[in-house]
Amino acid sequence: MRLFHRTLRTALHSLRRNLLRSSLTCLGVVIGIAAVIAMMEIGQGSSYTIGQEIATLGSNVVQIDPSDVIKAGASTGRGGRSTLTPADCEAIRRECGAVRWAAPSVDCRLQVVYGSRNWAPRRILGTTPEYLLVRGWANLAEGASFTDDDVRDAAGVCLIGQTPARELFRGESPVGKEVRVRNVRLKVIGVLAAKGASVSGGDQDDFFIAPWTTVKLRLSGTRLVTAAAAAVPANQVNSLSELYPDGQAQLYPERSTLEVVDTPQMVRFSDLDDIWVSATSPQHVPIAMRQIRQLLRERHRLDDDEPDDFRIRDLTASSEALASTSRLMTNLLLCVALISLLVGGVGIMNMMLVSVTLRTREIGLRLAVGARGRDILRQFLAEAVLLCFVGGVAGILLGRAASITITALLRWPTLPSLPAIIAAVAVSVSVGVAFGFYPAWKASRLDPIDALRYE
């Protein structure tokens, strides 16, 4: 132990004699370690944020929406035709063994009015109570959810997110109060729990939920029968009475086939914009997607050579792919930071070689008065390791400061990483040993007589 203290004291004295040179030498290690710490903390923050985003999506979420229609080379885009119905959703829930929950949804964008204030939520969604289970929203911040009876009765009730609650009620409790949407009065029975912003920056709390029958039949309830109808042969074009799935009586005189195609009408139609599904487990998501696809193709009577008239998307897989990309970018940045560490190590080796040359007479004198080669080796190796260790500590502090600054100025998420700090100290010491050994070994091999004669 006394030998260790003596060696350390000698190394400190030697480095302090050339403080500026020592500081500039370890600058490469400082920058390299700081870069490693900053990149690791940014990567940890990104991974945590993406993990939170996956959690806000719900458990094992799969989204089903209508496919597009291509007519004469032109695509109508999403929702170009009506292919999903509430019966499809019920069949998925009943017949797909890998599905835990399934919820239909329709959406629109309208203004919500309360007193003299109004707000247009990012999304007005009509659905069933199971949607809250699919999206992990079952625990409300206030109030209670609507029921299946409310869905059957197209009841005038709704749930609102944190953003509409703040903008419309300004600190008041929304529960029990009435809002107006298209002059339809809806009673607020619950407030959704906060989810925060998504990875893409969207406000997930700017939400308004009501029974899908209420949204479909009382708020929007319309779909434009577009020129896609022209794709149907003339002898297969629906008459007006056939557009009502509930068998309602014909309200208007029957139009000719040409009138149906040339003059689109706004009609009530119980189609869906989406079906939201939660698989029983992450491992069962591919099975659930396969079962859903097979079931919907059978229900929609699609031949083997016909494309799907719906799309199935695994939202959790998309977020996990984003997380994988984030990890890849973090690893690439770490490689760049490690290169800077390598450059710093070369700088330390160079400085130690210069130090050996400049201190040749000192080394010869120590050897002449009885020092052994391993004592010289130990001293120069201690100087290199000490230089890298001090540089590592300074790099850790600089990296933490860089992370805090990035979070404050750019609003990027960062998360302290204890393994990265421990690894940084270990790497800095390893660099000192690896790049300091050769100069120390060279110093220990000097001949005392030649060293004393060195000018």
Image: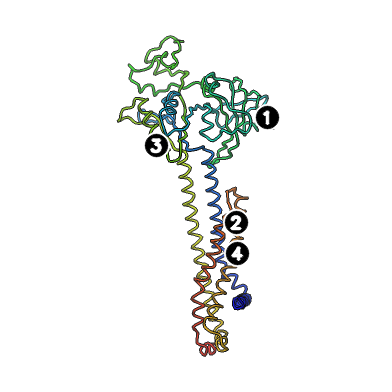
Relative to 176, 263 lies left or right: left
Residue at 55%, 57% (x, y): give it. Answer: 419
Q: Which residue does the numbered mark 2 point to in the structure image?
A: 402
- Nearer-the-camera pick, 393 or 452: 393
Label 3 to label 2: alpha-carbon separation: 45 Å
**Of the numbered discs in the image, which one, if any, rests on residue 173?**
1
Q: Which residue does the numbered mark 4 point to in the structure image?
A: 393
Label whose residue precedes the other's in the sequence (3 or 2): 3
- Which amino acid does the dot numbered 1 rest on? Ser
Secondary structure category for the residue under label 4: helix
Label 2 to label 4: alpha-carbon separation: 14 Å
Label whose residue precedes the other's in the sequence (4 or 1): 1
Report the number of numbered marks.
4
Relative to 263, 415 lies left or right: right
Secondary structure category for the residue under label 3: helix
Q: Are marks 2 and 4 in contact (CB under 8 Å)?
A: no
Mark nearer the viewer, 3 or 4: 3
Q: Which residue does the numbered mark 3 point to in the structure image?
A: 287
Label whose residue precedes the other's in the sequence (3 or 1): 1
Relative to 178, 299 lies left or right: left
Label 3 to label 1: alpha-carbon separation: 43 Å
Q: Residue 175: percent from the left, percent from the top?
A: 65, 27
Mark nearer the viewer, 2 or 4: 4
- In which quarter of the view is residue 321 placed? top left
Q: Residue 433: percent from the left, percent from the top?
A: 51, 71
- Which amino acid does the dot numbered 4 rest on? Val
Label whose residue precedes the other's in the sequence (2 or 4): 4
- Which amino acid does the dot numbered 3 rest on? Ile
